Amino acid sequence: MTKHELNEEPQPSANPSVVGRFLDMPNDSIFKTFAVAILLCLICSFFVSMSATVLKPLQIANKELDKRKNILAVAGIPFTNETINQAFDQIDSRVVDLETGEYTEVVNAETFDQLSASKDPEYSVDVASEIDIATIGSRSRYAVVYQINDANGDLEKLVLPVRGYGLWGTLYGFIALHADMQTAAGLKFYEHKETPGLGAKVDNLDWQAQWDGKKAIDSNGLVTVSLIKGLVAPGDPDAAKKIDGLSGATLTSNGVNNLVHYWLGDHAFGPFLNKLRNSRG
Ligand SMILES: Cc1cc2nc3c(=O)[nH]c(=O)nc-3n(C[C@H](O)[C@H](O)[C@H](O)COP(=O)(O)O)c2cc1C
């Protein structure tokens, strides 16, 4: 045994640097334990923030693609994952001033974020509680709408963004109207918090398919379509204005009914839809 091995006292570091002295510390020292834990946290948070930053553009692109998919689907335009952008080229995105019901160019339809705008005092209006049947609190003064034109350039369908509270949170989606601006063509939600098997039946394709052809608005601009409790009876003379309620999910059904009535009504898209209808004669 050498003289060095016999010596039980810790040896002074051969490396006098800070790192050397740190490495020479006993592993069970409180300072070393905390220092290693903090270092590990810093390294991990660096990688988490770096991946969040690097993936952000991809997330934005995917969100836009998903929005496009939903607009195409509610408008009944066929597409595959490879042809989403190509199919979307036939859609004309335009901005509407909801107060005047006129098209406007004060904001850019491609970049305007209506949901962010609804929280921005410069771009939003508070929705008074007595008219806030969709429970949204405030809404953007401008809305991006999506026009689908036929081969002659005439308006064939119109897709409008809608949102409103269900049972567990806000449902976000699109409603499509046929060219008469009275008949519904579809309703589809791209985000909600409703319970699978209950409120989430709003995603059921058979339930969604009922919307096409329903009389959503009458010639005076009154919203006529409603979700009922239970199923629409085949012989019901008002079947054209009724949609099956979601069984076991009356609260979600009420939420969907309310948001459709709010957005198609006088305090949202109503003035715009009336003008479009009148301009068609
Ligand atoms: C765990 C749980 C989740 C529920 N999720 C929903 C829902 O997503 N939407 C809804 O309307 N009701 C939901 N309900 C049921 C409601 O509490 C309520 O009973 C229901 O809306 C009544 O609908 P009905 O009259 O069609 O039975 C849920 C209930 C429970 C216990």
Image (tube, rainbow, N blue to C red):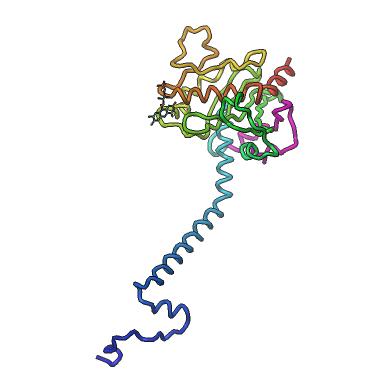
Q: Does the magenta stretch include residue 175?
A: no
Res 41 quadrant in image = bottom left
Q: Is residue 79 above or below residue 176?
A: below
Quadrant of the rendered image holding ligand 1 = top left
Q: Which image quarter is the C terminus in?
A: top right
Q: Where is residue 246 in the image (x, y as percent from the top left)?
A: 44, 22
- Residue 111 falls within the magenta-colored stretch: yes
Q: Quadrant of the N terminus?
A: bottom left
x and y, in percent, of residue 25 in the image: 38, 77
Front position in the image: 27 or 50? 27
Is 86 positioned to the left or the right of 37 in the image?
right
The spot of residue 200 in percent (x, y) is 45, 29
Q: Which residue is drawn at 52% across and 6% down?
A: 237
Q: Observer-nearest residue: 125 or 79?
A: 125
Over which residues does the magenta segment extend? 84-113
Q: How many dots with numbers?
A: 0
Judge whether residue 68 can be spotted in this image. yes
Furthest residue in direction bottom, as rendered: 3
**Residue under the point 64% across and 25% down:** 158
Q: Is residue 242 above or below residue 79?
A: above
- Rendered position, 9 above or below 104: below
x then y, percent, for residue 22: 43, 77
Which of these two is toward me, 169 or 71?
A: 169
Q: Which residue is drawn at 63% across and 29% down?
A: 127
